[in-house]
Amino acid sequence: MDTIQNKPILVQEYLQNLLKGNRANCSSIARQYLKENPSIKDLYEEVFKVSLYEVGRLWETNQITVATEHLATAVTEGILNELFEQLIPLKKYSKKVVVTCVENEKHQVGIKMVADVFEMKGWESFFLGTGIPTSELVKFIHETKPDMLAISLSVYFNFANLLKMLEQLRNEFPALQIIIGGQAFSRASEESLSRLGNVVLLSDLYLLENYIDSINANLKT
Ligand code: B12
C-alpha cells in the first residue's frame, strides 16, 4: 500500500517537522532535496503534496487538530513563496495565465503550485488564490487578456459552482483556453465530467508540464 511509511526518509522527516510547525527545518529539508534532485516539480509532488495529503488523512481521522493542519498548510505556503526565486527561467514567452479557484473553494496550495509551474515554463502567471467572485474574475480577465485560465476545485460539493462559473466565463470569453484540475475530479462521475464542456482536465503537475511544453514548442521566446 502507498502509505507515508513507504516514502523516503526525507519525506517522513519533512512531515514530522511540518506537524511540529518547524518552518526552518522544513525549509532546509526542501533545499537538501533540491540539491539531490533539482526538480521543483518533484519536490512539490513527492514531498509537499504527499505530506499535505497525509496531514489531511491525520486530520480526517482525528489524529491531529485543525490548528495543526492550519499550521502545516501555512508552513508549506511560506516555503512555496521562499522557493519562488529558484523557479524563474531564463527563457520567457509572451504568454499569460490567470490562475484561480472555483467560488467558495478555500484550498489554494495546489493551484499555487500550478502558477509556479507556468512561471518555470516561461509564462507570466497571475495567481488570484481563493475567494474571487466570478464577476470580479471576468473584470480581471478583460483587463489582463490572458492566453489561458487555470481553475482549481478540491471539494466536490463546489462542483455546481464550477459549472455556473464556466457558463458565465464561456458567455464572456468563448475562445479562452481553460484548464481545470484538483482532487474533486477524482470523485466526479463520467456524466458530471461530460458537463464541463470545452475545458482540459489535468490531474497533476507532470501532466501540466507536458501540456505547457506542447504549447511552448510552437512559440518563439
Ligand atoms: C489544507 C486543507 C484545508 C485548508 C486549506 C487552506 C489553504 N490555504 O489552502 C482549509 C482549512 C481551508 C480546508 C477547508 C476544508 N477542507 Co480541506 N484540506 C486541506 C488538506 C489537508 C491539504 C490541501 C492541500 O493543500 N493539498 C496539497 C495540494 C498540493 O494538493 P491538491 O490540492 O490536490 O493539488 C494537486 C493536484 O490536485 C493538482 N491541481 C489542483 N488544482 C489544479 C488546477 C489545475 C488547473 C491543474 C492543472 C492541477 C491542479 O495540482 C496539485 C499538485 O499535483 C486536504 C488534504 C488533501 N488530501 O489534500 C484537505 C481536504 C482537501 N479538505 C477536505 C474538506 C472536506 C474540507 C472542508 C469541507 C472541511 C470542513 N468540514 O470545513 C473545508 C472546505 C472549505 C471549502 N469551502 O473549500 C477534504 C476534501 C474531500 C473532497 N475532495 O471533497 C480533504 C481531501 C481532507 C479529507 N481527507 O477529507 N482544508
Image: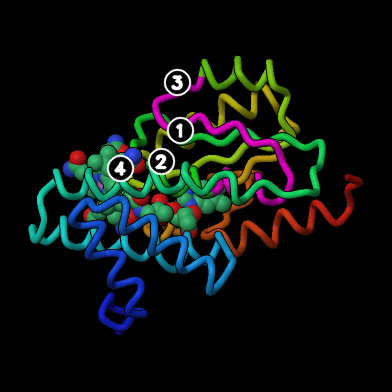
Given the image, on which type of amino acid does mark 3 rest?
Answer: Pro
Mark 4 element type:
helix
Mark 1 close to ligand 1, CB under 8 Å: no
119 in magenta = yes
Foreground: disc 4 or disc 3? 4
Q: Which residue is mark 2?
A: 108
Given the image, on which type of amino acid does mark 1 rest?
Answer: Gly
Q: Which residue is mark 1?
A: 129
Q: CA distance from mark 4 to mark 3?
A: 23 Å
Q: Give the left or right position of residue 174, taking residue 41 as reference.
A: right
Q: Which residue is mark 3?
A: 133
Spot occupied by residue 122 in the image (x, y as percentages of width and height): 74, 46
Q: Upstream in the sequence, badge 2 or badge 1?
A: 2
Foreground: disc 4 or disc 2? 4
Mark 3 close to ligand 1, CB under 8 Å: no
Given the image, on which type of amino acid does mark 2 rest?
Answer: Gln
Pointer 2 and pointer 1: residues touching (CB < 8 Å)?
yes
Q: Which residue is mark 4?
A: 74
Tell me which segment is drawn in magenta: 114-134
Mark 2 close to ligand 1, CB under 8 Å: yes
Q: Give the left or right position of residue 113, taking residue 149 as reference.
A: left
* Above/below status of 149 relative to 193: above
- Labelled disc at residue 149: none
Mark 4 close to ligand 1, CB under 8 Å: yes
